[in-house]
Image (cartoon, helix red, strand yellow):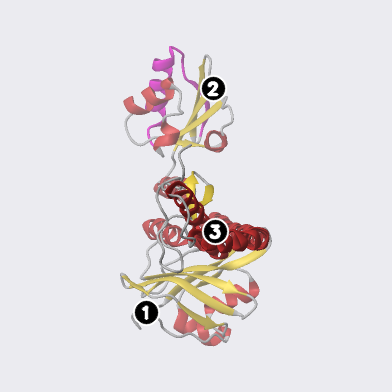
Amino acid sequence: MPAGLVGKLPAVVRAAATAAPGPVYLVGGAVRDLLLGRPVNDWDLASPEAAALAQAVAHAARSRAVPLRANPLTLRVPVEAIGTVDVVALRDDGLHADLLRQLRETTTLMEVARVLSGTLAQEDLLEAIRQQVVQVMRCSSYFLALYHEETEELDFRLLVDGGQRYPPFRTPLGRGPASVVIRERRPLLLHDLPQEAEALGLEFRTAGSGEASRSWLGVPLETRGRLLGLMAVTDYEPHTYTEADMALLENIARQVALALENSRLYEETRLRNEELERANQELLAARDRLVHAERAAALAQLSATLQHEINNPLTVVLGQTSLLVRQEDLSPEARSALEAVLDHALRIRDIMRKLQSVEDRLTTYIRDVKMIDLEGEDSGGRSLPSNPSSGGPPR
């Protein structure tokens, strides 16, 4: 019994199962209700030693066992707080084996559900599926193929043959067993493939190691009315698989198909989010370029305005000051003042030249605030004084 179910059994039942001789099985509706999380009021147990098990339950519950029928021997133990516990005897080895098989299948399906819920990445999912299938079914070869309806191709995502994993490959639908499963959307069980293939009009070819399979069992992968592909197990020996194996593989396939669909949706969502992120980054970059272009246009307009409004009077100032400085009868104080005026006028001229390439002189001032760097050399190689007032008249 799965550990998850054992932990949900009442203490009375666990104690009796431990004390009783021989194996003990939980059967009937109690198994279903436990799996679905429903309350259980009627507990059904089966064991080759039914009488001893019933006495153990009665002893643990301080109750007594009441015979219900003789063949098969069935006893009921009323247990306060949990309802009734019915104990039935296993009549023969066949029933015993059937219960073991059902228990193994239930355990497998629960484990498959647990494993498949733990991953959405397709490659990890495919390997997890294979590991669960090969634990409960004898197989020389296992494969899972996805179906591409638009091209009518089978995409063999996972093929393991003779213990070796082979690279993925695609092949068009043909007349082989896998194609029958896809076209007819039904499971297919072949007990001896070479003998049955001719009678059914099937063609088959070997893959992987090249050794021909004799037993073949494949089931479709469908969910929400959508055919996703198929999974199959094969064996080199004939008559390996039964109808019960086919039913079990179908149950596993239902869970696998749902997990694959979730994986596909997850991958589509991931790719869509990546595309949205790229588009967002492109929009941000375009916005930055637009802001930069608008700022450059505004600065160019400002620069042109300043060039026009300042250069004209500046030319007059430079020309007149240069003429006055050349006069020989100037006093030292007047000459010093005129030279200061000339020097500052030349500085203004140099600044106006630099404003012609204002975009190249933007630098960070504080955080995202930009300022125009007017220090350094101008296009003519003239260095500006570090102190704009140096050489000027006292203030």
Residue picked out by circle 1: 208
Residue 47 visible in this rendered orientation of the protein = no
Instruction: Report whether residue 226 is seen.
Output: yes
Give the residues drawn in magenta, as a range.
Answer: 47-70
Q: Determine which residue is flagged by label 3.
A: 321
355 on left or right of 168: right
Q: Earlier in the sequence, mark 2 or mark 3?
A: 2
Nearer the viewer's eye, disc 2 or disc 3?
A: 3
Q: Secondary structure at mark 1?
A: loop
Give amino acid for label 3. Thr
In the displayed structure, would residue 387 be above or below residue 49? below
Circles 2 and 3 in contact, beta carbons < 8 Å:
no
Nearest-to-viewer mark from 3 and 1: 3
Q: How far separated are the C-alphas under marks 2 and 3?
A: 119 Å
Label 1 amino acid? Gly
Residue beneath label 2, please? 84
Picture residue at 43% right of the left edge, 35% below the top: 4
Which of the pair 303/135 is nearer the observer?
A: 303
